Image (cartoon, rainbow, N blue to C red):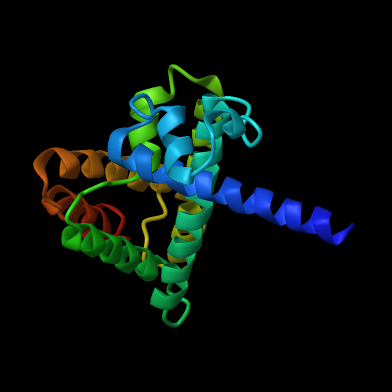
Amino acid sequence: MSTLARKTSKDFEKTKQRLLEVGLSFFEEKGYNATGIQEIATRAEISKGSFYSYFSSKEDFGAGVIRYYTETSLENWNHMLEEATVNGDAYSALGKTFVSITENYKNAETKKGCLLGTLAAEISEASEECRIELQGSVNRYLEVLTNHISIGQSMGSVRNDLPAQRLAGLIWDCWQGSLLRMKIEHSVEPVSNDLELLFSGILLAR
């Protein structure tokens, strides 16, 4: 590959990354439907026509933003889990990580919550492409949750009368629901209350 081709490819990927970052910011601030391609292109400092060199449609772009958000947030989440794991106690690390994320929300001026939950409520019925991408993203989180719960079950700290996969689904559903309440009430109290109930009661081995 020539130097010019490498430079062009690098510039292309840099601009595409910039578009994803801008899209994520807009989606968190305004949502998918209220965000226009023109304002995305303007903030990314490209023409509206050039936008279609990177993404074939707004749906394609939306799916790209979902993938980008999932990759970055999962990377951060896994890093937090690794730091919180002591003596192989992955289940305890799970609770600590959720509490840590909740503290971040508490200290944030704007309670954004989880983009996956926000977009699921907004566009899962309107865009099949985005719905499929959302489903894949949620499944990746559920896989991490299931693995950590399974370790907790093997260590005797988590109830084993229900499959780890079902408990993972319960955690995810409670988490997303409490984040929506957080946005409505402008308070992390619903999140903290649900986490305490889950990790200090419902999930514990008897």
Closer to the camera in the image, 38 or 28: 38
Q: Which quarter of the image is occupied by the C terminus? A: bottom left
Furthest-bottom residue in view?
87
* Quarter location, residue 196: bottom left
In the figure, 146 relative to 42: above or below? below
Question: Residue at position x 40%, y 66% from top?
Answer: 91
Closer to the camera in the image, 163 or 14: 14
Closer to the camera in the image, 87 or 190: 190
Give the image location of residue 83, x and y in percent: 42, 77
Question: Residue at position x 79%, y 57% from top?
Answer: 6
Furthest-top residue in view?
126
Give the image location of residue 94, x and y in percent: 37, 64
Q: Can residue 166 be seen in this view?
A: no
Give the image location of residue 43, x and y in percent: 42, 43
Q: Is residue 17 visible?
A: yes
In the figure, 35 relative to 150: above or below? above
In the figure, 107 relative to 69: above or below? below
Question: Residue at position x 23%, y 38% from top?
Answer: 180
Left or right of 121 on screen, residue 71 = right
Q: Which quarter of the image is occupied by the N terminus? A: bottom right
Left or right of 188 on screen, residue 204 = right
Tally of numbered discs: 0
Give the image location of residue 136, x and y in percent: 55, 38
Question: Residue at position x 49%, y 20% from top?
Answer: 127
